Image (cartoon, rainbow, N blue to C red):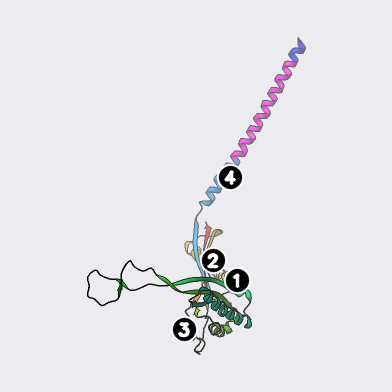
Amino acid sequence: MNNLNEKEGGILKHRILFFISLLNVLIVVIAVFFVVSMGSILQGDKTQRPQLNVNGEGKIFVRPDIAMFTATVASDAVRVGDAQNQNASRSNAVIDFLKKNNIQGKDVKTTNYSIQPQYQYDNRRACPILSDESIPCFSGTTMPPRIVSYQVHHSIEIRVRDLNKVDDILQGVVSAGANQVGSIVFMVEDEKAAIAAARKKAIEDAQAKALILAHDLGVRITKITGFSESGGVPIYYRGLEAQAFDKGGAPAPQVESGEQEVRSNVTITYEFK
C-alpha cells in the first residue's frame, strides 16, 4: 500500500514539474512577444519623426556621338516581281555604299519591308435614264478599283558613329538609290555616365538646400530616410528630306549635332530634430 502511494506521489510530482516547465515556456514566449511588439511600436514612432523633403536639380551639357537616320528605297512597277527586283538592286547598292564607308553591320538594320498594290478608281459615272449631257458615262453598277502597279518599300536604319562623315553618308545613300530619308536623331552612346554626372550635381544641390533650410528652421538633420530620381538623356531630332539633295547634283546638307542637355531631378527626405 505504501509503495502504491509513493508511486502515485511520484506521478503527481512529475505532472507538477511538467506544468511548471510549460508555464515557464509560456512566460518566455509572452516576454518575447512583448519585446517584439514594443520594438515595432518604437519603430513606428521613429517613422513619425519630423521629416523634410528637398528637391535638387542637376544638369550637364554633352556632345552627341551617334547620328541615326532611316533611308528608304521605294520602287514601283506594273509587275510585283519587277518592283521587287528594282528595289533589291537599289537597296543592295545603298548597303554596299555603307560598307565601303566603314559603317559596321551592327549599325545597319532593316526596319520595314512592304509590298503594296496601287489601285486605280474609275471616275466615270453611271448614265442617267434621260439626259442630253455629253459627259462620258457607263451603264450598270460602279466599276471596282483595279491594280495598276506595285510599290515596294525597304527602310534601313543607319547609325553613324563618326559625326564628321554624316553629311557624306546622307548624300551617298541617296545617290546610291534611297529616295526617302527620315529625320536625323542625335544620341549619346554612354548615357549612364552622363546621367550619373547630372545626378551627382542634383544630389549636391539638394544637400546644399537642406543645410540652408535646417539652419533657417533651427533644426539639426540626423539622417536620410528617402530618395527618388527622375530625368535622363533626351533625343534630339533634325528635320531632313531626301529631295533637298537628290541625284540631281545638289550639295550635301551640313548637319550640326550641337549639344544635349542631360538633366536629373532628385528628391531627398531628411529626418531632423
- Residue with the mark numbered 1: 193
Tell which tag, 2 or 3, sits nearer the viewer. Answer: 3
Q: Quadrant of the N terminus?
A: top right
Q: Give the residue type at disc 4.
A: Gly
- State the SS at label 3: helix
Q: Quadrant of residue 104?
A: bottom right
Label 1 crowd (10 A; few <14 / some 14-19 / many >=20) = few
Label 3 crowd (10 A; few <14 / some 14-19 / many >=20) = few
Residue at the image point whose x is 54% and y is 50% from the top: 46
| Residue 62 visible in the snapshot | no
- State the SS at label 2: helix
Distance of label 2 from label 3 (alpha carbons) = 53 Å
The disc at residue 207 is 2
Label located before the other in sequence (2 or 3): 2
- Residue with the mark numbered 3: 243
| Residue 229 visible in the snapshot | yes
Mark 4–mark 2 CB contact (< 8 Å): no
Distance of label 1 from label 4 (alpha carbons) = 42 Å
The disc at residue 39 is 4
Residue at the image point whose x is 54% and y is 77% from the top: 87
Residue at the image point whose x is 70% and y is 25% from the top: 17
Q: Residue furthest top?
A: 1
Residue at the image point whose x is 58% and y is 84% from the top: 165
